[in-house]
Image (cartoon, rainbow, N blue to C red):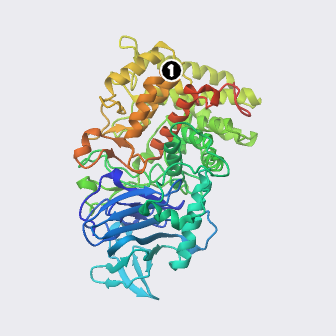
Amino acid sequence: MTTAYHPIEAYGIVGNGETCALVAPDGSVDWYPVPHVESASAFAAVLDAERGGSFRIGPDRPSTSTQSYLDRTNVLRTAFETDGGKLSVVDFMPHVEIDVDASARALYRKVECTRGEISLEVAFEPRLDYARGETELERLDGRVHATGGGCELALAGDVGFRVDEAASTVTAADTLRAGDGRWFAVSHDGPPPGPAECERALEETVAYWREWAHDHDGSSGGAESDATAADHGESDGGGADEDATGPSCVFDGPWHDDVVRSGLALKLLSHAESGAIAAAPTTSLPEEFGGVRNWDYRFSWPRDAAFTVQALAHLGHLEEAGAYFEWFLGLCETAPEEIQPLYGLHGDVDLAERELTHLRGYRDSRPVRIGNAAAGQRQLDLYGELVLALAATVHHGWKLDAADWPAVRRIVDHVTTVWDRPDSGIWEVRSEPRHFVHSKVMCWVALDRAIAFAEANDWDAPLERWREVRAEIRRAVLERGYDGDRETFLRAFESDAVDAATLLLPLVGFLPFDDERVEGTVASVRDRLETDDGLVHRYEGEDGLSGGEGTFTLCSFWLVDVLALSGRVDEATALFETLLAYASPHGLYAEELDPAGADQGGVHRGNYPQAFSHVGLINSALYLGRVREPETAGPEPIGIWLGEGPDVPN
């Protein structure tokens, strides 16, 4: 059983397009919801080291370990070393797009002794349904079945299992010598596969991820040799093969590997059936250790769509960008007043927030929450973000049909009647609604892009009214949201606080990058929200919650974007490389970073890995590539497309 908490950034992640699992450096699976990422957990030791449940495989004595992904894949290897030998544990889940039978919906674990002799220890302790009730174990057909809370798991492996039904625990021990291997599989959809099927699944999974990443392994060693080569000193596991064949990654700049890893992380968070992208695969990882800012992020936010589409499309992952487009285009068919800030990955609208009081939380960070009450908030910015996402997708080659226009028009007509109301804003504050500047600007964006769509396509729209309201919003933002004395845009009307979301004003085209009001706002954000480490907090002021939080990873990338596109390329590059240094050992990012916490249990804060953080990294790398090497024809910022692509308004 897991008895201590690992740093958030110590975890690797594997997944299959439906769910994900977090694997600790000691070989323990500490988070695994089934059958979907938003479902109840089977293992949740990351939220309660004693009660949550885990599945550990590793040496039975003290060891050191390192984790890394097989090159250009989401197949994770944990390499252990003891005084007697070396052990490799390879974890993966075959993506549901791979043409295999239902038994492939499983977590696979390949164990191999690569040197000397290792005494292996296995501890399987499922705690189904968030450990809310009893989990019962039963031997059946050579496997161990766990049931509870309406869920069932089946464990298979080529070792002898000892089942303690009273403790709901399965253990095993074995001695492996160099070259010996064992397979384990935990299935939640059909019987677990046998060893031969596991080997084939590993090969197919490695090939799938490398094909998806637009790279191909030119070696003939296959998945198995790659999984163990590093332990024999035969491969460093990094970089592209010199004799690789097939298409290359769209982005081929100095941060290629970082961008590819971020793209692979986004693919893990993309739901294969619906096309929706989860904000993160976890719930309640805290923004402050011991604090109350613990949220469930296993849902999809339309707010994230425009930047996400841009990131995926420019990396050449047009299928994922298109699926996401179809998903949020479907949201536009909803009555505008009923569009929610977030949805379940299958389109669920009932995301009632509840507390799991029986779980202690990561490092005693309570409450542990499932569901998210922000689904019921008024967030006016989402309308602009939806229309901007449509513009982003059209920019990359998809067509917005005339049949889709009435739904867009209804959204924009709604904006003309609600833009001047207070809301909870992009940061989903739990305090009283306010007139947030970012929300007003995104209402302006909704009108601005919709006007351009109607003009470019000669679609029916009340253009005169829309232009009047657009001008009215602009006046309100400039008069009530800008402080001329301090030369900065503010967090909200009649406020004295600043907000990193105002960095987006030039990125969405509200003002040019060289406007003195933009330059003053950038200076103010850096002065009041940027830390000595170069990282950026979200905002100043009341938000209805106690405690604090770390710097917001995405906001730091926004600062990189604005600096780069303002011509301050050296500053942007230096900040970007600072951010890269904060990545986890796996190249992953949580929602927030707290450099001061390095000696207090880790630097990363919040749910992990965070999709928006990786979207920020990809877009920053693309923008930097564009300004550093203009001849490479990198992307335009999403707010200033002028006549680019089919049906793009100008």
Residue 572 can be seen in this image: yes
Relative to 379, say whether 5 is above or below.
below
Place residue 161 in its image quadrant: bottom left
Percent coordinates x, y for residue 230 in the rendering: 44, 60
| Residue 24 x %, y % | 35, 60
Q: Amino acid at mark 1?
A: Ser
Residue nearest the viewer, comparing 383 with 168 = 168
- For the point 40% across and 29% down, the residue is 500
On-image quarter of the N terminus: bottom left
Say which of 99 and 581 sits in front: 581
Q: Determine whether 573 is above or below 486 in the image.
A: below
Which residue in the rendered view is the most extreme toward the bottom? Answer: 141
Q: Who is closer to the viewer here, 105 or 10?
A: 10
Q: Along the line of sight, which residue is nearer the eye, 444 or 163?
A: 163
Residue 95 shows in this picture = no
Horizontal side of residue 635 vs 621, given as left or right: right
Q: Which of the 4 image quarters holds residue 65?
A: bottom left
* Residue 119 pos. (x, y %): 31, 76
Query: Which residue is tagged 1?
Result: 566
